[in-house]
Image (cartoon, rainbow, N blue to C red):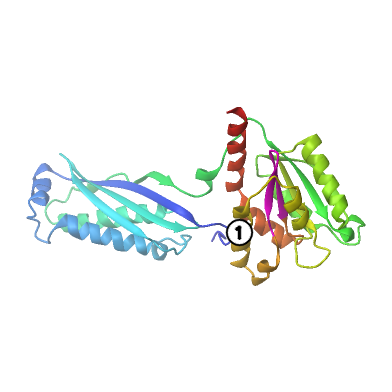
Amino acid sequence: MIDISHKKSSLRYARATGYLIATPEIIAMVRERKIPKGDVGSVARSAGIQAAKRASEWIVFCHSMPVDWVEVHMSLEDDRIAFTAEVRSVWKTGLEMEAMTAVSAALLNAYDMLKPLKENIGIGEIRLVEKTGGKSDMTDRFPENLKAVMLIVSSAKKSGKKKDKAGDAIRSFMNDQPVDLLDEIYLDEDEQVLTDTLTTLCERDKPDLIFVCGATGPTPRDITPKVIRALSDRLLPGIGEALRHYGYQRTPYAMLSEQMAGLRGNTLIIALPGSSRGATESLNALFPGVLHIFKMLRGRKSG
């Protein structure tokens, strides 16, 4: 089974279709509700709705998930009965299987009700026709990769006394993003040094993105939030809120990290925790949604 614990919930939607081949005579009986076993449309709709809610019981690798809305529609054509299932939920993974399971159940129940009338009825193609939500809908694309710099604020890591696992996690994560990590700079927990380094990067090199990893806690040596707050032309509190919310769902210690972000010019500066787990969780919370800010910034510049 695929691990989806790192994913964020988003509004998901899926639509699937399928059809049952039948004679015009049978279709007329369905339309006039003269089928001996009852109203085909009502039974098939109920079966499809119930099946969508229990798709994980049928399909081995399908995740159990809350289904917020299901609808199953039946339409009568000249030589077939078509079913459409729609499913919507706010969750971590897609609803393709729920929609296709709903159509399958509707078709099987319709088949069961009609088979005594004619042996050569058959079930036609079942297919997914639409899905929305999730990572694929929130990924912005750029003509060229964005440029990023990583600052590691830790005297222990700078001196080599402590392995930089958080930096390793960031580098690995960026390999799958439209972001080129141009430089990595190790700094002591020194407020003036961090201030000068960020100022030089923003005014001279002007990368799109700067990660400041480490020194985000509540101790006197945790200077990263203070420096970012002082240097930013505009703080972006929503980013910090999203990071803490995501992290707190996984560990209560996330409340102790002052993760934040701000803009200096058109450079986005983001504070990340110094632990590898904290950095990874923060990146999962940020991407791909955070990339949309660069579309907004570039639109502002061109306008």
Residue 151 is situated, as x and y percent measured from the top left of the image, at 80, 49
Is residue 207 rendered magenta in the image? Answer: no
| Residue in the foreground of this view, choosing between 265 and 25 | 265
Residue 288 visible in the displayed image: no
Which image quadrant for residue 113?
bottom left
Q: What residue is shown at x 64% (from left), y 57% (from top)?
A: 240
Q: What residue is shown at x 50% (from left), y 50% (from top)?
A: 134
From this view, report whether residue 292 is shown above or below residue 5: above
State which quarter of the image contains the C terminus: top right
Residue 168 is situated, as x and y percent measured from the top left of the image, at 77, 53
Whether residue 104 sits left or right of residue 191 in the image: it is: left
State which quarter of the image contains the N terminus: bottom right
Residue 16 is situated, as x and y percent measured from the top left of the image, at 34, 47
| Residue in the foreground of this view, choosing between 298 and 166 | 298
Residue 106 is situated, as x and y percent measured from the top left of the image, at 26, 56
Which image quadrant for residue 71?
bottom left
Q: What residue is shown at x 82% (from left), y 57% (from top)?
A: 164
Whether residue 146 sits left or right of residue 249 in the image: it is: right
Q: How many marks?
A: 1
From this view, report whether residue 154 is shown above or below residue 211: below
Magenta-colored span: 259-271
Which image quadrant for residue 180?
top right
Is residue 267 rendered magenta in the image? Answer: yes
Q: Mark 1 points at which residue?
A: 241
Residue 218 visible in the displayed image: yes
| Residue in the foreground of this view, choosing between 298 and 66 | 298
Q: Is mark 1 on a helix, strand or loop?
A: helix
- Other residues around mark 1 within 10 Å, as few (<14) / some (14–19) / many (≥20): some
Q: Which amino acid does label 1 sit on?
A: Glu
